[in-house]
Amino acid sequence: MAATGTTTTAAGGDIDDDLWSAVGDPTRRRMLDLLLSEGSGTATGLSERLPVTRQAVAKHLAVLDRVGLVHATPAGREKHFRVDEEQLARAVAQLTGVGAAWDGRLRRIQRIAETVQRRKDAQEQDAQEQQAQEQDAQEQDAQEAHDTSGAPDDNDQP
């Protein structure tokens, strides 16, 4: 049974829903990028580089901290945040696993769609062939009716 905040996939792997929710927000992803590139950062410093207030940055950092993606170290009146690379690697591994599972699902869907299309194409071709056969039969019947009616042919000369 999956723990709270996790989902068990069809393949039997656990996905940390809280972790995915945290990295699902574009502002938080940008914050992670900044922290990774700079090594660490404060809410004030990050707010200067993002289009959100310091309070919003602090709330985003709290979410990232709660799922273990960042850790805070007090430094005077501020806290310096660093990315937990082990937890980030765990998130990347989960993303890779889910991506691979979806790639497999999409390949199966594509095969089904191709099979359906081949069947549809074959049915259309069969219908066209049947229509052509019916038209040929009608023309042949008309020719036979004309031949047996005794009416002179256009090619007959008086």
Image: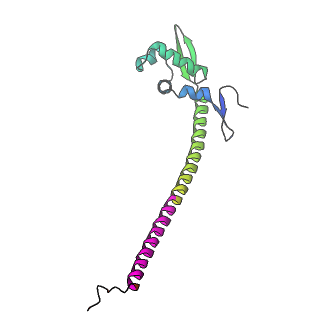
Type of colouring: rainbow
On whether residue 146 falls in the magenta region, the answer is: yes
Image height of 50 relative to 153, above or below: above
The residue positioned 56% from the left and 45% from the top of the image is: 103
Magenta span dominant secondary structure: helix
The residue positioned 51% from the left and 15% from the top of the image is: 58
Q: Quadrant of residue 51?
A: top left
- x then y, percent, for residue 20: 58, 29
On whether residue 122 falls in the magenta region, the answer is: yes
- x then y, percent, for residue 98: 59, 39
Image height of 37 relative to 140, above or below: above
Please identify the residue farthest to the right as the structure is shown. 1
Residue 42: tell me if it is visible.
no
Q: Quadrant of residue 70?
A: top right
The segment highlighted magenta reads 120-147
Image height of 109 relative to 95, above or below: below
Please identify the residue farthest to the bottom as the structure is shown. 158
Q: 44 or 94: which is nearer to us?
A: 94
Q: 59 or 110: which is nearer to us?
A: 110
Quadrant occupied by the C terminus: bottom left
- x then y, percent, for residue 12: 69, 39
Please identify the residue farthest to the top as the structure is shown. 77
- x then y, percent, for residue 71: 58, 19
Residue 107: tell me if it is visible.
yes
Q: Quadrant of residue 15?
A: top right
